[in-house]
């Protein structure tokens, strides 16, 4: 019996050794099982390595196919689009953008417009005509190639109605102006070199106004601003005449995304009764002789035009036109050209100061008045919204109990 029990025990151990590779049974069988397990793992890894690249390739192919389909669809849409605008309509749109270019940005707008239109649509002659209209409307300053001097490209300064020839009112020199590029070249011996009789009463008043307007503009201008002034004689009569005063200032800082200009144009009507003057014309420190001019009342009418553009993370424009009806100005005790010029400049300075003060007041009151007009401060119930959620919950609870 003991032998039979030993045989049964040994048989159990042997079976355990065969079934358990980690047991102390036959080492060859354990190694074989381990090898089989490694083979199964390697086969699974191989299948994974084979499947993953195939799946990635299939996904990439599908993405490429989808992108190609999108491109084809976009091309079909582009092919289906028809440009129905005529060349005349395109030119009208381009001209609108150019004529409304912000201060100091005509060249930039022109560059963008040319990128959108065929090169043949805006030729040089048409471009010069558009730029000339823009310059006349804004009294643009164009620089002379010989230095920092600037001449105003405006209708009052045009010589004999010519499109490119303008005179400097102070010196009488003529300049050939390239309107599109904003340059001016002095023309020696041009038709504007011949000026009117300096001893005429109207020219005496013009010189007096020129000197005082220039001093006023230099004193009023901000730092880094370009200022140009001019006084033109636009009408001569047997007695009296008409003068136009132009005061222009400009500041352009495109690096900081803003620009602006200020144009003030005033028409002075000198009445009949002017006599050849002998007053001081402010061109030197020596008096010119006794004053013999007598002036009756003088009327002044003008317009102030202000433009500003701010385009950092936006596109904000300010355009203001303030018209001033004709007003009578004169000196109560002295009717010489100098006294009349002082009264005229004081009048236009007061008008410009009033406009500046009005703009500052508008900006100061904007949050209280302008924004209130744009949106309602309180709801229709005239009660402010209570954002306390606990009170709203309590109110609903009380209402449910009632």
Image (cartoon, helix red, strand yellow):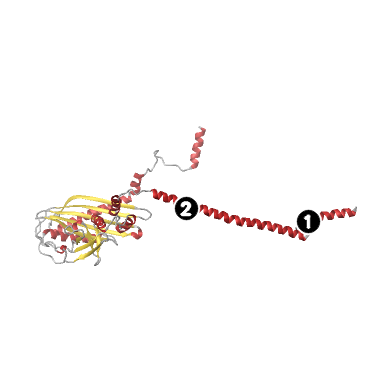
The CA span between labels 2 and 1 is 62 Å
**Mark in the foreground, 2 or 1:** 2
| Residue assigned mark 1 | 18
Residue nearest the viewer, comparing 54 with 354: 54
Residue at the image position 21 percent from the left and 57 percent from the top: 154
Q: Taking the image as drawn, is residue 208 in sight?
A: yes
Instruction: Give the class, few, some or many, for how many residues have Cα within 10 Å of label 2's Cα (few <14, many ≥20).
Output: few
Asked which quadrant contains residue 213, the reply is bottom left
Under circle 1, the secondary element is: helix
Outermost residue toward the right? 1
- Spot occupied by residue 3 in the image (x, y as percentages of width and height): 89, 55
Q: Please indicate whether residue 205 sits to the left or right of residue 111 in the image.
A: left
Q: Taking the image as drawn, is residue 345 in sight?
A: no
Q: Does label 2 or label 1 sit earlier along the sequence? A: 1
Residue nearest the viewer, comparing 325 with 76: 76
Rendered image: mark on residue 68: 2
- Spot occupied by residue 22 in the image (x, y as percentages of width and height): 75, 58
């Amino acid at each position: 019996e003991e032998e039979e029990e030993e045989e049964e025990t040994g048989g159990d151990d042997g079976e355990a050794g065969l079934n358990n590779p980690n047991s102390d049974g036959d080492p060859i069988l354990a190694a074989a099982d381990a090898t089989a397990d490694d083979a199964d793992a390697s086969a699974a890894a191989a299948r994974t390595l084979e499947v993953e690249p195939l799946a990635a390739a299939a996904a990439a192919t599908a993405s490429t196919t989808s992108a190609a389909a999108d491109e084809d669809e976009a091309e079909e849409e582009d092919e289906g689009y028809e440009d129905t605008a005529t060349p005349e309509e395109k030119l009208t749109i381009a001209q609108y953008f150019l004529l409304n270019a912000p201060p100091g940005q005509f060249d930039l707008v022109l560059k963008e417009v040319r990128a959108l239109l065929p090169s043949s649509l805006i030729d040089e002659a048409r471009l010069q005509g558009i730029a000339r209209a823009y310059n006349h409307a804004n009294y643009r300053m164009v620089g002379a190639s010989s230095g920092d001097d600037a001449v105003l490209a405006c209708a009052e300064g045009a010589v004999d109605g010519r499109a490119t020839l303008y005179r400097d009112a102070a010196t009488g020199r003529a300049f050939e102006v390239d309107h599109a590029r904003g340059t001016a070249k002095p023309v020696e011996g041009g038709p504007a070199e011949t000026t009117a009789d300096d001893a005429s009463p109207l020219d005496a008043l013009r010189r007096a106004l020129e000197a005082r307007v220039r001093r006023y503009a230099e004193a009023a201008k901000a730092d880094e601003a370009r200022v140009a002034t001019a006084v033109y004689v636009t009408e001569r009569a047997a007695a009296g005449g008409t003068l136009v005063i132009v005061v222009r200032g400009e500041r352009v800082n495109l690096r900081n995304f803003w620009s602006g200009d200020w144009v003030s144009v005033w028409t002075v009507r000198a009445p009949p009764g002017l006599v050849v003057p002998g007053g001081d014309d402010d061109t030197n420190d020596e008096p010119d002789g006794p004053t013999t001019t007598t002036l009756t009342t003088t009327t002044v009418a003008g317009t102030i035009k202000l433009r500003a553009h701010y385009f950092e993370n936006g596109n904000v424009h300010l355009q203001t036109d303030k018209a001033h009806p004709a007003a009578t100005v004169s000196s109560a005790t002295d009717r010489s050209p100098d006294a009349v010029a002082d009264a005229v400049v004081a009048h236009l300075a007061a008008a410009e100061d009033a406009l500046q003060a009005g703009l500052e007041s508008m900006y100061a009151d904007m949050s209280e008045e302008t924004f209130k007009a744009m949106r309602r401060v309180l709801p229709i119930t005239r009660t402010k919204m209570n954002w306390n959620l606990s009170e709203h919950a309590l109110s609903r609870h009380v209402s449910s109990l009632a």
